[in-house]
Amino acid sequence: MRGITPSPRLSDEERIDWLRLLRSENVGPRTFRTLLHYYGSARSALKALPGLASRGGAKRPARIVAREEAERELVAMRSIDVMLTALGEPEYPRALAMIDDAPPLISVRGNTALLDRPMVAIVGSRNASAAGAKMAGRLARDLGQAGFAIVSGLARGIDAAAHRESLSSGTIAVLAGGQDRVYPPEHADLLESILAEGVALSEMPLGWEPRARDFPRRNRLISGLALGLLVVEAARRSGSLITVRFALEQGREVFAVPGSPLDPRAEGTNGLLKQGATLVTEAGDVIAVLEPILGTKIEPPAEEAAPPPPPEVLPDTEARTRVLGLLGPTPVALDDLVRLAATSLAVVRTVLLELELAGRVERHGNGSVSTIPSS
């Protein structure tokens, strides 16, 4: 992928440019990747941002992170022993690099060698039963002894139980906020214990207080890091089921521990079993499914054909109007936009990029796009 795979590491200047671009307004992982495909470097993309956002209909100039701000963040990270690693660098987890919306930069703290290990994610109810927490801990301990690193989200209940029982073998806490903003606050001591042999990982800036919408974003990293996702207790509308959706989109194995039909905390997990998740009563059930996968070398995704550079002649008003008219709150596929707008793929991609940077559209995991309601 041109512009996205450093060889082998980013220079200090490139790292600052990547951080500036990623932290700039309306630039998420997919938009970042598109910009690097188009412009070849983060520095060139930064220069193009104002014009792109303006053509997309931005009501005010796009906020572009200043070099000094990015430098301050890097200095602050180093002061608390946090490393910022880029997609394609040796420390970046290979499984995570395979997902469509892999974060271009992640901050990691602790024993980074653990990120080379095969991983299993364990998630479940925050309001866990005693039996559920005990089962999660037992599975985490046994999987850790079998050589797997345990990934979870540092939440109350099942997450905490899984982390605690895999402290000695290695566990990875994926944070919804910045590295210096532990949530929930009462797990600050647990996080310190994790860092003795494990890792804290985040894609958010230092100082970022997690909000409700940040937890699904974190959940895609939990499933993306792992070969398989194990759910222990989840209600019908549990956030753990969002993680399951990400895992399925990412091609990960899904496992579930059965529970009593009388316990609402088991409705989600029992539902997963009905839908084909692997039933788990002991660590061996997980290992039996993952062992064949471990025999296959994990490789980064094949290089995509890079999108063509932005056309020298910008999309004309008529083409832009046709694309805009086809967009709405219901997601629509890129191929359908090209066909229905009767224009080229390059034109549609350019219009969508402009709209993304203006904060007017959002992309979805299946490659479709929809408008963002006006606030």
Image (cartoon, rainbow, N blue to C red):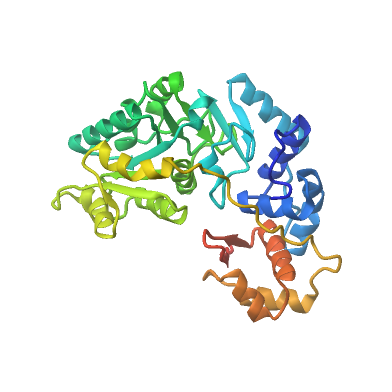
Residue 25 makes an appearance in the image = yes
Q: Say which residue appears at 52% left-offset and 58% top-offset.
A: 365
x then y, percent, for residue 82: 58, 25
The C terminus - image quarter: bottom right
Residue 96 location, x and y as percent?
A: 52, 43
Give the residue displayed 65% in from the left and 58% down from the top.
359
Q: Is residue 235 above or below residue 187?
A: below
Q: Quadrant of residue 78?
A: top right
Q: Is residue 294 above or below residue 114?
A: below
Name the foreground residue: 103 vs 362.
Answer: 103
The part of the image, by quadrant, that contains residue 364 is: bottom right
Q: Measuring from the top left, give residue 273's x and y in whole percent.
A: 25, 55
Residue placed most toward the observer, 232 or 59: 232
Side of 342 where 241 appears, left or right: left
Count of picture labels: 0
297 sits to left or right of 14: left
For image coordinates 37% across by 27% down, the residue present is 186
In the picture shown, does residue 300 fall above or below 154? below
| Residue 321, percent from left and from top | 72, 76
Could you tell whether 92 is left or right of 164 in the image? Answer: right
